Image: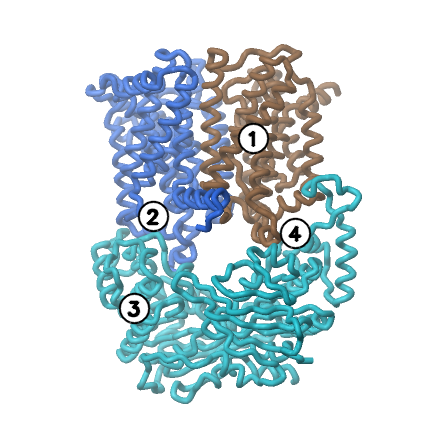
Chain colours: A blue, B brown, C cyan
Amino acid sequence: MAEPQSSSAIPVWVQPLMAAFLGLLISAGLVWIIGENPASVFGVFFRGAFGTTYDLGLSLFYALPLACTGLAVCMGLRARLFNIGVEGQLTVGTFFAALAGLYGPSQPHLNRIFGLLAALLGGFLWAALLAWLRAYRKAHEVVSGIMLNFVAFGLTSWLALNFFKNPSTQNPETVALDASLRFKSWTFFDQAPIGFHALTVPVAALLVWIFFRWSRMGFSLEAAGAKAEAAEQGGISVASMQFWSLSLGGLFAGLVGFIEVYGNTGRFVVGFSPGYGFVGIAVALLGRLQPLGILLSACLFGAILKGSLDLDFETEKITRDFALILQALLILLMSCSLPMPSALSSLWQRIRRNVFGTRV
Amino acid sequence: MELVFDTLLAGIRMATPLWFAAMGGILCERSGVINLGLEGLMLIGAFTAATLAYFTASPFIGFAAAGLAGAALAAVFGFLTLTLRGDQSVVGMGINLLSVGVTPFLTKIFFQVTSSTPSLSVEQKFIMAPTLIAVGLIASTALWLRFTVSGLWVRFAGEHPEALTSAGIRVLRTRWICVLLSGVLAGWGGATLSTMLASQFSRQMTAGGGFMAIAAMILGRWSPLPTALICLFFGLTDAVQIRLQGSLSGSDTAWMLQLIQISPYVLTLLVLAGGLRASRAPKALGKSIEI
Amino acid sequence: MTNFSTEATPAVRMLGIRKAYGSCISNADVNLEVSRGTIHGILGENGAGKSTAMKILYGMVAADAGEIWIDGKKCHMRSPLEAKALGIGMVHQHFMLSEAHSVLENIILGMEPLYPSLGWLPEALQPLAMRTAREKLERLMNEHGLEVPLDASVDSLSVGTLQRVEILKLLYQETRILILDEPTAVLTPQEVDRFFIQLKHLAATGKTILIVTHKLRELLAVTDSISIFRAGSVIASVATSSIDADALAALMIGKKLDPVQNNSKQLREGKPLLSIQNWPLKKTRNPSFQHETFSLELHAGEILGIAGIEGNGQQELVELLRHPKQAPPAGTAARLELLGRDVTSWSAIQMTAAGVGYIPADRHKEAILLDQSATRNFVLGYQDHPSFRFGPFLRWGAIHQATVNGMKLFEVSPLQPDLPIKRFSGGNQQKIVVARALQHQPRLLIAVHPTRGVDVGAIQLIHKKLLELRSQGLAILLISSELDEILALADRILVMENYRVAARFTGNACNETALGLAMSGADSKKEKQHG
């Protein structure tokens, strides 16, 4: 019932399934056109993603940041705001986490908590800038989000390379934090970097669910997005809701930084994110802005990412970039989710009118 | 003196792709459509131009094909946003991602590698032709919007589509034409990148050029001439930075480079914070219309 | 010159026009005739069907049945374009002008001037022959006394000038039949007078003009003949010279029966629950305007009806009571008190908490979230109420229960609180909105058009409930454009006109004619005009 987008009686899961199916169909068509066997390509995908527990672990590992960014995008979209600045927010969050790990308390647990808070703070602050521009300066959130992304990359890499650079390597990265501070990987997934830090993601999804299902602010935020005038009449300040929907989203973007630093590399690597923030848009749309749906679609996207890695070796003409095509197709197919049925039917009616000359 | 002249020339060359893309952006936004897919349209154009120039040995054929490829991708954008009334921002970002995925996919098919297309020889490249075309384009865009019948329609489509409808002109068709034209122009911008500035197509070679064009458009208040000047400024910033990179590497002031790089974006943000967008942007921007 | 109905071929003739939107009949049977070179008034209450009829004439809406004859020829108009080709033009109540463009550009849109020598170019690519357009417009301006600055940007002009721009645009397009929708709604009295002189001049040069309005004085002042709309039909067409304001008001309002009546109308004494004193409602930048101030007192157990034509300060009154949040204007004796307390700095949330219920005027725009469930809509505005709240959380169980109770009380069907509210009929949606405003026993209810766009059954139920609660001590401020509603329910009636109280009535000693006259400002304006 917390579904802000359902415009008809069609169940919420129909469109994502249709989009996923169509996306697979179109990409299978592409594969077939260039002379590969779609079945074997998808076989490679499947084995790459789920073949061993290690593969499964890596799929999950890719799913974690995507779920976070999906939640971040979802926070904005619930108030009808398009948070495209997630990429920059997670960059700042990661940078903060890496520094906090370096300079934080040496006791491991305290250090981790400190790092988590720093990551969240980084994401939040960068998002708050965007949110302020949107809510109080009425700047278009998409344009300012893109600009803030570039500024975040530039600033963090400037700081990282000029003041915190790891002197023992040529790579553009900061000094790594002590290995003992990082979370140990669970043995179940072989050596895949999945440990206790992974639990923060389902917890975050749960919090989002609680927020929208039970909290006053979640309710107000959705009301502000659904109809600003009605919300204002109901005593809700639309501007402040816009502010919070974007800036709270930044918390989840910041969480990516914690996972990246404490669960994976232990440092801030310039350009580490392969566009997590942008894929988060697809994750959120495919998950129909439902926390559980976002977790599931993040797993799907994680599997696509992991599965695509083996394409380089196992097929002749298809590379890992194929994952990007699949993601883009899913975004495009979900983009008109809201008016799709009505637009298609009105298109159909126009065709009927023009072709058959019948009035409908 | 020669140094200044060289840097100026380099700046003009580097501004050329931005000029194309920014003019495409202006057409689109003046007609009321937010086109965040400029980056993707440029990328597909860059790939098409480099590939065709390689196979036909004529940069002009590559240039023309880049325009067509941009228009084709823009048609996908138009179908999703104008016909199906999908969210313009979301579709634009989807188009970007699609381009990033499709171009290496195609490179691999044609050339068996994913990273880049083969290098072009000097005869397969442009020297200055796109720059001249771009200058002509800026002038004609400005004149067209200001002084012609259809230019008037475009401006009303973005400001007050209802007035245009009640005057008997189809807003949707006006917007479609603008979207397709912006595809052509952004495609040409990409072609300039791969066949004039560089001598091959490489992965994600646009490197934010499409977004830079959007920034220039905002700073230039959606009018062609000021926007072109801002693009030129961005191009000069790039040229200066590259020149400094050569002379400063290793020196104490090298740290300034990254800051120079982000200065266009910071500038745009400052202007946005000043509340400019709300007052100057075409009023009907981003609003889909009932068919 | 009122040679009404003597011309052989009228400029406009509408015969048996019928239009229904679903089950709602907007035009039942519209017949009217307008002679060439005359000004014809279209009069009627809100929802009487006059706008629909004019949209049909302008080709924006297709009629279900009926015929339109223009200059003696039967026409089928499927779009405004075809209407334009026949010489019909319309000035909408909300101007169709783009603020970012110059007056000249706005005027030529749709009929762009071209250079004859460049005819070989495709039309879209031809340059605009601005000088040709300018010459033609200057001629028109001189001819009709309609000066506008052609090169000024539209956003820099006053509404009076914009009105002239719209007219000039029609003249430029060689329109012969001009439809003006509420043309004076936004004009100052001085502008109105000037505007009327221009209209008369236009008519004298052979243009036919149709004015849609509900301002009686203006119709009497400017028209040659008038058609009166009621309930989707033209109930009378008269020559202006043969009728006066009283008769027009009576024709316009008619008499509808409301079975729910307040049979114990009485005056309350003592300390008022709500008191507004000397408040200047009109927001004006120009200090030379005289500030009309507004005062009212409302007691517990009383229904105070606010009658008046929309746009005379009702909206500002509601805003004041909903989000006071404004200090009384400096240097005035303005006061706003609720239960004896000064509430001028209060927010909407505080007002709700103090026991003020609110039924907004525009259901879809201001009252409900269409895509969300009845339950979620039921809590909107009460999300801070202690019984619904547990720290930062909402008690959905309690909210659900309250929704079910409210829906039961108002006999909402279907009784499914989880259904999106858009799946309920308009009447049931409104019942939910009313039930929401009445939960938690408010002390004061602000009801703005509480039964607008609602079926008869729901109207009766809502009226019955309002009367029940009034007798239990609820104070109700009833703002409505439905005179029947106000006459049936209100203990006392204020008539608002031009941001002030034009007249006060007690519920028993009042009738439609008296209200109608006070609403239209028929006497007061006339006095002001000559005084």
Name which residue type carries label 3. Answer: Leu
Q: Chain of mark 4?
A: C
Regarding mark 4 in the picture, which secondary structure is present there?
loop
Q: Are marks 3 and 4 on the same chain?
A: yes
Q: Residue furthest bottom?
A: C509
Side of A175 relative to B66 (left or right): left
User: Residue C21: x, y in percent?
Assistant: 43, 61
Element under label 1? Answer: helix
Chain holding disc 2:
A
Mark 2 secondary-structure assignment? loop
What is the number of the mark on residue A8? 2
- In three-dimensional space, the C-alpha distance between marks 1 and 2, rounded to whole angstroms, equals 34 Å
As displayed, is residue C5 above or below residue A65?
A: below
User: Which residue is at 66% across, 74% downward?
Assistant: C8
Residue C473 placed where, x, y %?
28, 78
| Front tag of 3 and 2 | 2
- Crowd around label 1: few <14 · some 14–19 · many ≥20 (10 Å): many
Q: CA distance from mark 2 to mark 4?
A: 38 Å
Who is closer to the viewer here, C160 or C7? C7
Question: Which kind of residue does numbered mark 1 sit on?
Answer: Ala
